[in-house]
Image (cartoon, rainbow, N blue to C red):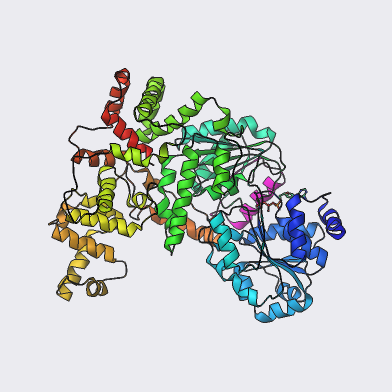
Amino acid sequence: MDTMLSVLKQYFGFSDFRPYQKDAIQKIIEKRDCLVVMATGSGKSLCYQVPPLVVRKTGIVVSPLISLMQDQVMALKQRGIKAEYLGSAQKDSTVQRKAEQGQFDILFMTPEKACTVPTSFWSNLLKEGISLFAVDEAHCISEWGHDFRVEYKNLHNLRSVLLDVPFVGLTATATEKVRFDIINSLKLKNPYVLVGSFDRSNLFYGVKPFSRGQSFVDELVQEISKVVSSGSTIIYCTTIKDVEQISKSLAEAGIEAGMYHGQMDKKSREESHRLFVRDELQIMVATIAFGMGIDKPNIRQVIHYGCPKSLECYYQESGRCGRDGIASVCWLYYTRSDFAKGDFYCGDLKTETQKRAVMESLLAAERYCVLATCRRKFLLEHFGEQYPADRCGNCDNCTVSKKERDMSREAFLLMMTCSDYFLQHLVTKYGDHFLRVIQQLSQGLNLSLDGEANLLNNEVRKLSTVSVKNSSKKLTPAKFEAWKMWHEDGLSIQMIANFPGRSAPIKEQTVAEYLLEAAQEGLPFDWSRFCEVIGLTQEIESEIQGAILKVGSKDKLKPIKDELPENVTYQHIKTYLTMQSCGVSKDDIQTQKDSESEIQQVETHCEANISDHSLMEKCDLEMDKVASRPVEFTTKRQKVSDMKEINSTDFKATENSILEWLKHHDEGVSENSKRVFALWLQF
Ligand SMILES: Nc1ncnc2c1ncn2[C@@H]1O[C@H](COP(=O)(O)OP(=O)(O)OP(=O)(O)O)[C@@H](O)[C@H]1O
């Protein structure tokens, strides 16, 4: 114990361990496998940095990000600790040889490198002694984690090579499912599991909806100008375009700010990073490429200009704030289009589990944003930690008055039902009336505006009675319900598949099949919307037609599929055949181009949270492709028109009808008003 403390003092200059650090270090020295799950900024690094210095044997640390390893190596060297890294960016060819001779106290490795160095490397190093094999950011092992990395999956192979070496997984963002996966995947033996509190009590959490654009940026710049002298600020953007726009506006306002994103060259990024870390620049405007491993103590404010893709990402990024324990502020600004990027985020994901994990994380982020109750409680409970009180007193929902809190929830609803221009007009001119109407609506529906509304699926769905009845014997209630959600409520296939009211999500492909069956049974069907969603173009239709002619029969799908190029799926063929049997010709179908849909604005962004430079750029390029990919999202107008087709009542949620509400709000809540309100509350 004395050696541990003297190492802590000698190398790190700290007088005492934080409680869990001592435990973890002790267990690692005793050669026990460990899983350390602790809050951002809680000091997990010391858990793997101290044991090698105590037992005087190399500690191996697997880390996902080269720049992060480089920073850590530099910081450790400055403390007189012999540290190095092995990975594609290592230019010094002697490092590997020195490493296997046990010349380093701590050796960082990328997961790829750890899995590909020759076995002789490990056997030589084992002769010198290995104190631990740590896997930092261990959530990357799990398909349920927010940044699954397939290379992490292979690390367990080293278990049979590194016999008698304690394996240690460390992460700040692991739900119970992810913890379970880490233990299994790394084959941890009787691990000592340390799960600390995720609470960062010095951080204030606030969320606001916003309209992306110059006028909001101008407001933001004004706000920043007020706090620029009180500490550092990071502004996280979801796109490079936003980074550039905000940086430009800050510069025009005479505020010096650094910029960091994946399209900048390495040197400029390093320079930006260096200036920020050394307090030569107080503001950093960055994509999520800047984040992991940023351990600057005095960041007083983290602002998100757009919602991240998961609550875990948000926790990580906001976790850069207030690492010195001093009160600091995290504001998240979101638009509803942030939550419609699920298809993109699922992009190239291979397994259903990964896709489901991404959708769940995005939904959690959305719920966090529209929440009207304590944000800290929600955040902690997401990670499986019970928060003992209902209010933390340090988030926007716990510090504003009840009235104000309700207004923010309503403002969100307002945003969802109005165009930006109309919203502005309404709020300026009729704001109070409108809010009163929404309050009335919520009462009419017996809904709470305190954050429970999203969970009211069953009640709310009852309101969506339609004139179309399920008279088909073939169409099961589940299939009819899926059709109703799609056709009547305008929900996307993705939303239907993951509908919160369902006991378990179903596959999107299954939903698509349900819908085709409904169409076949003669229910009203928007073929152009469906074809657009599944990417069935006229060109593909012609190809399928040709393939059927060639095969000479349409009884079996496989021979038809075999005649077609890879990009034509079974789904395309099935849809084509269903359309034929319904008597729908391709001329009846016009590809719907929804220029209004905000999802189309998905811009070049997405530097994967954990990625190296090349990966980031690949990701940026991929985002370019998104605009041309068939994306499913239903705008309010589509939804209204869809509903109108089958409703006997004249239902419209237009600007005029909302103004009508305002005029007659004292006369009670109409059924139609209830319906549009209920519909939006579902997501
Ligand atoms: N025992 C200690 N006493 C004082 N400060 C400490 C102690 N342990 C760690 N710290 C400091 O706490 C800060 C955060 O530590 P560290 O970077 O290890 O956190 P982390 O848990 O890895 O966070 P993240 O998951 O966000 O990267 C560092 O600046 C570190 O020097």
Residue 342 position within the rendered picture, expressed as x and y whole percent measured from the top left: 42, 51
**267 or 51, which is in the foreground?**
51
| Residue extent of the magenta highlight | 261-285
* Residue 288, visible in the rendered structure: yes
The answer to if 275 sits in the magenta stretch is yes
Residue at 36% over, 41% down: 457
Determine whether, in the image, residue 230 is placed left or right of residue 12: left
**184 or 617, which is in the foreground?**
184
- The part of the image, by quadrant, that contains residue 353 is bottom left
**574 or 265, which is in the foreground?**
574
Number of numbered discs visible in the structure rendering = 0
Residue at 66% over, 52% down: 38
Which quarter of the rendered picture does the N terminus lie within? bottom right
Direction bottom: furthest residue:
120
Residue 213 position within the rendered picture, expressed as x and y whole percent measured from the top left: 45, 36
For residue 87, above or below residue 387 = below
